Image (tube, helix red, strand yellow):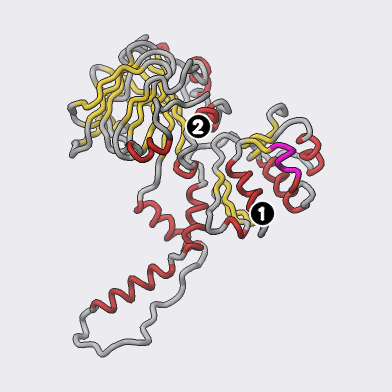
Amino acid sequence: MQLDLNGITPQQFLEQYWQKKPLVIRQGFKNFQDLLSPEEMAGLACDELVESRRVFKSNDEWQAEFGPFESYEELGEKDWTLIVQALNNWLPEAEELIQCFDFIPRWRFDDVMVSYATPGGGVGPHIDLYDVFICQGSGRRRWRVGDLGPHKEFAAHPALLHTEAFEPIIDVELLPGDILYLPPGYPHDGVTLEPSMSFSVGYRTASAKDMVSAMADHIIDNDLCNEQIADPDRELAIGSGVVNHSDLARIKQQLFATLDDKLISEFSGRYLTQSKCELDLPEELLGFQSLDVTEQLKLQPLVKLGGLRCLYFEATVADGVLYINGEQIQLGKTKESLIELLCDSQQLTLEALTPWLADDEILSKLTDWVNAGYWYFEDIE
């Protein structure tokens, strides 16, 4: 699978469009094939671990239901949509689609959402707070996109936040292989013209409110930032009830001083690698020994589990620090290239791992991750 941005480079896309304005990319994928069939998608939506929903109208009222689902016959042959979140957590083939957009770092990546819709199906006009590349699979879908503005939103259903009618700046019919890029805040509405599938590659960040709240929990849980605000150079107070400019500056400076790079990177690493959806992990640890891993590596590579989040920071990678699934891992100094391999690569080959397999601690860590299901051998069930 190869992405064609219609003659512009990824750098030009980031400079001209990313978080700035929508873009229709005709035939961004040549000969695009659905990553799975509607029947396979319906099978996923039967699983209670998979986040799914279906949206439809009943008596002109919007309805939304959450899976798992066992039947769709009652919905008829038009005007309904089935959605599965985090397809990349359950379908390895979704990784190839994600890799096409890797000019955006994975810490910004949210998930791949797949939707199947019958004629007339859609989820209604709405506004998203994340960036998304809507990749049209089989079938056709009409998309209308409005401009930024003070659009009023309302609850068309407790699970559906819609926006008022808008004047479109884009009114386009997407065909298989076409892509619609939408930055946050642009109202849009997609209506299916014939049975169709689309695959949305989403990129999201948390709000400052959510991150500050989570960081406060992290500080409390780890008993950090206990230093008292100090003022050994205090000047004579003119009024006993005033917080003067220098006091405010002192409070601000000492609060900010606690938020050093070490604290922020440690918190952010844990926070950003937590998966919002279930991962396809084994119910109990597998029974691999270190020798099993090295012997199997001679036959096939290790594959990173879909949806597993791994990242490192430029500021701490030289110290051997990385983050996997909400956990901080310390491998020690001189492990920078190994950390980059673990976080940047989808597969770990014997050739790439050979420099590290003689290190008992590293091999033990790798074996632990295999037993936890973070990396797996594709041909072993």
- Residue 174, by quadrant, is top left
Is residue 255 rendered to the left or right of residue 30? left
Residue 314 visible? yes
State the SS at label 2: helix
Residue 280 rendering spot, x and y as whole percentages? 59, 34
Q: Amino acid at mark 1?
A: Lys
**What residue is disc 2 on?**
98
From this view, report whether residue 357 is shown above or below residue 278: below
Residue 305 rendering spot, x and y as whole percentages? 60, 36
Question: Along the line of sight, which residue is nearer the eye, 42 or 111?
Answer: 111
Q: What stretch of residues is rendered in magenta?
A: 349-354
Question: Along the line of sight, which residue is nearer the eye, 263 or 25?
Answer: 25
Q: Which residue: 55% across, 51% down?
A: 312
Q: Which residue: 73% across, 44% down?
A: 367
From this view, report whether residue 116 is shown above or below residue 88: above
The C terminus appears in which quarter of the rendering? top right
Disc 2 residue crowd, few under 14, some 14–19, many 20+, Cα 10 Å: some
Is residue 73 rendered to the left or right of residue 304? left
- Is residue 115 shown in magenta? no
Cα distance between the residues tagged 1 and 2: 27 Å
State the SS at label 1: loop
Disc 1 residue crowd, few under 14, some 14–19, many 20+, Cα 10 Å: some
**What residue is disc 1 on?**
335
**Most frequent secondary structure within the magenta stretch:** helix
Residue 377 rendering spot, x and y as whole percentages? 70, 32
Residue 49 visible? no
